[in-house]
Structure formats: C-alpha cells, structure tokens
Image (cartoon, helix red, strand yellow):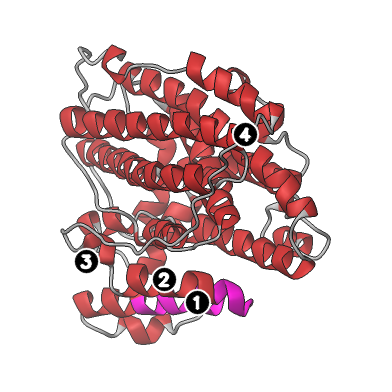
C-alpha cells in the first residue's frame, strides 16, 4: 500500500484504524488520473470516505440535477427496448409469493448461507486469530448479512436512479421500459429488506465505497452517465454478485429470492447496453468517450479493490488484525475471489459492447487483470434463464 504501514502501526488501536481509513481515501483520489473523473467522483468521495455520510444514522440528502426529456409525439423509436418492455411486463412477480414460511437459521451448518470455504480460515490463523467452529459459523453469518445489506443499499440507489433515468432517457420506448424497472427495484428493496429484517435480524450500514458510487451517480446531471453508472456498472456488478450467492447458498428461501431478482437484473443491464450502444458509438465526442472510459475503469477498480467488508472487520477484528491484514484475507479468500470473478465476467463484455473498451483503455484493464473477460457475452446476448442455467 502507498501509505507507511509501519508508521500507522505505532498508533493506538482506534486512532490507527482511523488514520488508515484516511490514507485509503487518499489512495482512491490519487488513483484518478483524469481531472474530469476526479471532478465527477471527488466530491462524492469526500462525502462518503471522509465524512462517512452513509453512517450518520439519519437520512441522506443528495442534490439531484438532470433534465427530464419529454416527447409529446409518443414515438415507437427503439424496437429492442419495446421488446424488453413486453418481457418486463410478463416477468413481473410478487414478493409476497416467495416461500417466506421457511424458517431460516443463519447458524445451521447443514443449510449454510455461504459455504465454509468462503473465507480462508487458515490464513486467518496465520495472522494469529483462531476461531472455534461456532465462531466460524457466526463470521460467515456476518459476511452473508453484510453482502445482503449492501445488495439492499444498492437496490435503494437503483430505485432512485431508475426513476431519474426514466425521466431523462432519450427513447420513448425506453421510458416505457424504465417504468417497469422502477417497479422491479422497489420490489427488490422490499424483498431484500424483508429477508434481512425477518430472517437474519442483522443489517449493516452502507459500505463507504458503494456510497461514493451512488452519490456520484445521483448528483451527476448527464443522463448517459446515470445509465453508465447504474445500468452497466452497479447493476452489472450486482448481477454477477447475485449469481455467486445463488450458486453457493444452500438456504432455499434466499435461493428462490435471488432466482427472481437475477431475471429482473438481466433485463436491466440489457436495457443499459441498448440505451448506450448508439449513444457512445455515434453521439459523443472522442474526448467525452475518453472521460467515460476513464470513469468506468476507476469505478471498476473501486468495486474490485475497495469492497472489502470493513464493516465486518470493525465488528470482529478491529483490535486483532490490522486493516492491511484484513484486506489480504478478504482479497485472497476463495469466496471473494469467485465473487469478483463473476462480477467482472458480467461487466467487461458490456463495456466492450457499448464502445468503452478502446485500444487506449485496454492496456489499463490488462494491467489490472481484467482484460481476460473481454470476449464474454454481453447483456444483449444472454437472458436471465441462460445466466441461471450457467450457474447450475
């Protein structure tokens, strides 16, 4: 890491963690080479990483600024979006119809929320922390609750962004489809919150880095940036994350919940690809394309490098492990490696499809180890049913 870990390690425990957080925030800003990208994400970074606005225990006010695009002709202007709209109407489902009668015991080793090898207990022991079998179960319960909490927070962001995008999108068929996504996202907030509240009884605060991304999107007035950020980046990464948990969990209610959500999310990302494919390939300048390429790359790194469950670290290991040790543990654990692999398998092909993987930016993805996903199927080439089939 860029900051002097030895110097930080000499500080008292609570101060050591706070200073380490400040240095990590400085690293995020230091990694942003494009001034326009820094201007777009920087204010949100200050609010999220330094001020921790998502963890104040009060509602957050985000100033939203965008143009609402009205078209009084009501044209049928995009056949692919019209098809998505028909599919979305047919694919609506009622969260009350999930098997909520199932009793969920997060500490039942016979029906694990996430598998035993999700976290590397041997590496944890090498740091001097040995957990009993019961403690390991509780740690995996905490990690599962943390991930589902972040899904819930992300879905709230997606709900508000979908409403904004429906106002701002330039295609009228896209507005009709967008109205179904607002309903989808509201349902996702409902079912994730109900599962966390009634079955897990453990809600974590929003991860600071996820807060930065949502804040940046909600306060950006450009409709295509809202699409890029929410439909391609956040929804694309979430689709991969949902797939990992769907594949690994043995808990039947959670599996059924995720099966339904994955079907919705596959349409959402497809919508983003359709909306941005022509926009980025034909209707923006080369300079604007470079900015969007750089922005997408920085957000991809933010999600890969920074989504480290420090909220679980603070609860479990604040006085037993250093933050760098925790990063090493989480970054190298089998479950989290699978988590990142599937996320980027879904994301990178979509960036290629909408024209944000030019020869200029590809070497950056190569250095980050992400270019190996380049030739995968984009969201317009794969349905929710196919995604689910691939996970079996």
Q: Secondary structure at mark 3?
A: loop
Q: Secondary structure at mark 4?
A: helix
Query: Along the line of sight, which residue is nearer the eye, 119 or 339?
Result: 339
Q: Residues within 10 Å of mark 2 (few under 14, many from 20)?
A: many
**Mark 3 or mark 2: whose residue is earlier in sequence:** 2
The reply to whether callout 2 and callout 1 are in contact (CB within 8 Å) is: yes
Q: What mark, if any, has residue 45 been given in the picture? A: 2
Image depth: mark 1 or mark 3 in front: 1
Q: Residue at x 53, y 30 (%)?
A: 177
Percent position of residue 283, x then y: 75, 55
The magenta-colored residue range is 22-38
Percent position of residue 74, x then y: 59, 33
Residue 26 on the magenta segment: yes
Q: Residue at x 19, y 63 (%)?
A: 56
Residue 32 on the magenta segment: yes
Percent position of residue 105, x then y: 20, 24
**Mark 3 or mark 4: whose residue is earlier in sequence:** 4
- Quadrant placement of the C terminus: top right
Question: Which residue is labeled 4 in the image?
Answer: 270
Q: What mark, if any, has residue 29 been given in the picture? A: 1
Q: Secondary structure at mark 2?
A: helix
Cα distance in 3D space between marks 3 and 4? 45 Å
Question: Which residue is labeled 3 in the image?
Answer: 319
**Mark 4 or mark 2: whose residue is earlier in sequence:** 2
Q: Residues within 10 Å of mark 3 (few under 14, many from 20)?
A: some
């Amino acid at each position: 890491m860029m900051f002097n870990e030895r110097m930080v390690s000499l500080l008292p425990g609570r101060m050591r963690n706070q200073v380490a957080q400040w240095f990590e925030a400085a690293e995020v800003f230091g990694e942003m080479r494009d001034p326009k990208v820094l201007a777009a994400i920087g204010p949100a970074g200050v609010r999220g990483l330094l001020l921790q606005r998502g963890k104040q225990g009060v509602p957050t006010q985000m100033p939203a600024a965008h143009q609402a695009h009205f078209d009084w002709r009501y044209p049928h202007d995009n056949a692919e979006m019209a098809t998505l709209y028909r599919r979305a109407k047919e694919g609506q489902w009622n969260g009350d119809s999930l098997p909520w009668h199932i009793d969920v015991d997060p500490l039942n080793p016979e029906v694990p929320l996430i598998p035993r090898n999700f976290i590397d207990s041997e590496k944890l022991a090498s740091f001097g922390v040995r957990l009993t079998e019961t403690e390991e179960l509780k740690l995996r319960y905490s990690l599962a609750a943390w991930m589902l909490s972040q899904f819930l927070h992300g879905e709230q962001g997606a709900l508000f962004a979908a409403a904004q995008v429906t106002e701002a999108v330039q295609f009228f068929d896209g507005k009709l489809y967008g109205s179904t996504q607002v309903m989808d996202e509201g349902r996702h907030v409902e079912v994730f919150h109900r599962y966390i509240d009634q079955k897990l009884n453990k809600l974590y605060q929003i991860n600071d880095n996820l807060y930065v991304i949502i804040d940046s999107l909600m306060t950006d007035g450009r409709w295509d940036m809202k699409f890029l950020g929410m439909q391609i980046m956040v929804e694309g990464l979430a689709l991969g994350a949902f797939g990992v948990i769907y594949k690994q969990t043995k808990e039947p209610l959670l599996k059924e919940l995720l099966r339904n959500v994955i079907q919705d999310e596959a349409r959402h990302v497809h919508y983003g690809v359709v909306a941005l494919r022509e926009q980025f390939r034909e209707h923006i300048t080369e300079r604007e394309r470079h900015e969007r390429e750089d922005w997408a790359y920085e957000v991809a790194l933010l999600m890969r490098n920074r989504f480290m469950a420090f909220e679980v670290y603070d609860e479990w290991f604040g006085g037993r492990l250093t933050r760098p040790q925790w990063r090493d543990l989480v970054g190298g654990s089998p479950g989290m490696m699978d988590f990142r692999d599937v996320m980027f398998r879904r994301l990178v092909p979509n960036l290629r499809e909408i024209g944000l993987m030019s020869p200029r930016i590809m070497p950056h993805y190569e250095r980050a180890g992400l270019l190996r996903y380049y030739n995968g199927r984009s969201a317009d080439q794969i349905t929710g049913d196919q995604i689910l089939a691939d996970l079996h």
